[in-house]
Each structure stands twice: as structure tokens, then as C-alpha cells.
Amino acid sequence: MGFTEEFELLTRACYPLLYIATAEEERLEASIINCAKRLGNRTIYIWDFVDGYQDNPNNQGIGKRNPLQALEFIEKLPPQLGGIFILRDFQRFLEDISISRKLRNLARLLKAQPKNIVLISPQIMIPADLAEVLTVVDFPLPLSSEIKKEIEQLLLAIGQTLDDRLLDELVRSAQGLSLERIRRVLTRCIATQGRLEAEDVELILEEKRQSIRQTQILDFYPATEQISDIGGLDNLKDWLLRRGAAFTEKARTYGLPNPRGLLLVGVQGTGKSLTAKAIAHHWHLPLLRLDVGRLFSSLVGESESRARQMISLAEALAPCILWIDEIDKAFAGAEGRGDSGTTSRVFGTFINWLAEKKSPVFVVATANNVQSLPAEMLRKGRFDEIFFVGLPNGIEREAIFNVHLSRLRPHSLRDYDLKRLAYETPDFSGAEIEQILIEAMHIAFSQNREFTTDDILEAASQMVPLARTAQEQIEFLQHWAASGKARLASREGLLGDRMERQSN
């Protein structure tokens, strides 16, 4: 259900107090005015702290610098008179006991009247005593059709035409921005060169990065890593390569649904996060990183609102990759946390979206501790596939050494004994291999010479890998995956090195 349908339904159902969090005040008010015209029996009243009511000369200035008077004005109107009362920035006064009490009184009174109070705020700020009477309504970012209409109007104003390909590219690059930001960046482009050009896409993307940073929920993450930068994980890479064209219109015509996502479970430092970045680069899709901890707030209703905002923003930017790192830490024990059910509600919002989403948002979630994941997260239908990413076997370690040394010493790669390095580093993860290479470089640099295979082996002998310090946890993960709970990211067995050594 879109905003227009939901808003009209709530007004007809006599929901007295509506709370809408958005920075797009002008666009929201225009949408509410259109809704009021369709309803036919609602007059629009608009109030702000500086000017009071501004809807018509008879009410001009009422409630100016007096929010309580603004509410008393609503109370004194005839019961049969229909109206929608838009109160701007009213969240700043909700902690005042007189305002809070008056709103609760009005909530009772207006249930039987064709009146609705709409509080507009840039963010959710609801005191506990108003949580039961205020209904939060989501106002999504502009749809692609709205953005296209805005760009076409601007092109008409400057007398320019664009081919359909460039127009679609501009629309796609602007998705996820507010209409005001879109107007601002397009005006900047026109002021620079007098018209819109293909190069302006990069300016729009930079505006998008800035906008996403300001939400403080998602990060627009640069993805430069390639599939070839991942050593091993052949099953996982094959799976990804087969889906490289799955977001195209050709795939939709063929009958394929949009890919849903991946859950990567496994040992720390084995390339799960690197995989998320490589997917975005290989598929040429924007990478959004979600820090789940940012969703949670102490204010009533704000955590749930942030979760919905995250979903709305990700869908507005689709097709895209949504990367959620260490999701197990965010939702561990979601049912039993003593936070009045906030974590459970946020988790419920997120898990329902995973199951029902139709938009081309490919979710890549990583987890180290599968035991702490809620059972609902592992159920089929949330993700396309669950992969186990274990410790690299000998062949994969050789490939990892090759990736790093090709980057560090591309001209002297042959000087390193990769097979020996792989053999002498059992139970080392990819991240630990990278660290021993850095340590080997320090050893050689301090002696003013080039680092060698022996330096790398010396560095490895000084490091205790996680596989030994957290042996029980890693063995649990390996046996969990071996029991068929997840698909193996590597073609070789989970315990390949150990089995080889035991057989010898």
C-alpha cells in the first residue's frame, strides 16, 4: 500500500493523530492536499511556530508562537466541520505536559469528528505518554516516475531533449534522493554547462553519497574489490557468476525473479565481507552498508521508524547490494532482550521485509556465530542460499598467498614458494595470511632488504591463529555445515588439511 492509499484510509477511519517523519515538507504537504481534494470533506489547515495558521485570512496568525493555542483552535471548531491540520515541527513541543495532555484529550474528542491532526517532523521523537495515541505513517522517497517527471519538466524549461537511455540513467542515479536534492543538483549541473550531460550522472551520485551519509543509517560503500581478489571459495564464486545478469530486464522476461540475497556464515577473517564488496563490483551495483546498531534509539518508536527508513532508502536505490556485516551480533537473543520489545519489533520488520520484498535489493548478510541467529533468519525464503565459509584448505591458501603477493610484489612473485607457504600455514584464515605478510615485510624492512619466503614463515610461526584459540567454536561451525545446514563455499572438504595430515 502506497502513502496516498494509506493516508486516505487512516483519515476515513478517523485516526485522530498522525505522525509523519520526512525532510520533504513541501512534497508531503502537496501530497496531503491532493488527498484532501479526493476525500472532498477535508479543509487543509497549516500551522508553524513562527507564523501560526496560514491557510486563510480568517485564521491568519492564530497560534503564532503558541502551540497550545494552535491545538485549542482545533478543539473550538464545529464538530461537523472536516479538516486536516498540518502542524510543522510540532515534535519540539511534545515533552511539554500541557501540549501532551491536550493532544491526548483531542485524540478522544476527534475520534467522532472528521478531523485529523498531522505532525510533520524530520525525525521520529515520540514521548512514551503519546506512543499509544500517535500513529506513525511512512512517507517514501520519490518513485522513479516522479523523478522522471521532474527531470522532463526541467528539460522542457531549458528547451533540451535527451535520448531515452540517458534519461533513464539520470533517473536511476537520482533514485534515493529527495525531490529537493534532485532539483538542487540538476540546477547545479545546468548552471555549470547550460544543459544536462552524461557526465552529470557522477555529480548526482556524489549528491547521493552525501545524502546517504546524512541519514546516519546506511553508508554508500565504494566497491573496488573483484571476484579474482577472493582466493578459493569456488562454489560461492560459481553461484555468483551464474547470477551476474539476474537483475536485467531480459531475466524478468525469461521469468526469473529478482535474486533475494545470501547469508554467509563462517569463521572470522575468511572473506565474507570481501565477498560482499566483490559482488557489488562484479554486478556493477551500488553497495550500501548497514550498521544495524544505528537502527536502535532510546526514543519510543524511533528504532522501528529507522528500520522502515532503511528499507525505504534501499528500495529507492534498487537495484543495489545491501551489506549487513555481523548480523548475528545485532539480533542475538532478539526475543529475550530487556528493551521493551524494541529489538523484537525491529527484527520482525526486517525479517518480514526479507520474506516479502519484491524490489531488486540483494541482501548480503554475514555472521560468525550461527548459534546466536534467530531460527527465523535461517528459514528458507529469507535468502536464496546460505553458504558456509570455512578455513581455507591448502589449495585455497596457495591462491590467497598468490592474490596478496601479486599485489605486493608483482614482479618478483616467482621468488616465493607458494606451495610451501600454503603447507606450513594450516588453520590460517585469509585475514591472518594477510597479517603474516605484513609482519614479514616489517621484519625485512627493519633490516633494509626484500622480504622472503623464510620471513613469511617466521612471521607465521609467531602468530597463533584463531582456529586454535577458538577451536571449539570453529569445530561447532564446521560440523554444523557438514550436517547439511548450509552449502559449502569451497569445493574441497571442511577438514581437508587435517584429514590429509592424519592420512599421512
Image (cartoon, rainbow, N blue to C red):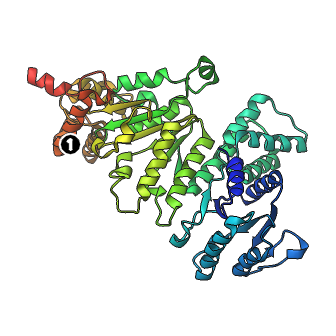
Relative to 70, residue 396 above or below: above
Residue 17 location, quadrant: bottom right
Asked whether residue 416 appears in the rendered view, the answer is: no
Q: Nearer the viewer, residue 333 or 436?
A: 333
Q: Is residue 190 left or right of residue 400?
A: right
Residue, x 33% and y 56% (percent of image)?
Answer: 336
Residue, x 80% and y 72% (percent of image)?
Answer: 78
Relative to 271, residue 19 above or below: below
Residue, x 26% and y 41% (percent of image)?
Answer: 436
The residue to which callout 1 is attached is 473
Relative to 210, residue 105 above or below: below
Q: Nearer the viewer, residue 120 or 438?
A: 120
Q: Is residue 441 left or right of residue 473?
A: right
Q: Quadrant of the C terminus?
A: top left
Asked whether residue 386 appears in the rendered view, the answer is: yes
Residue 437 location, quadrant: top left
What's the residue type where badge 1 is placed? Gln
User: Residue 264: horizontal and vertical position, in percent?
Assistant: 37, 36
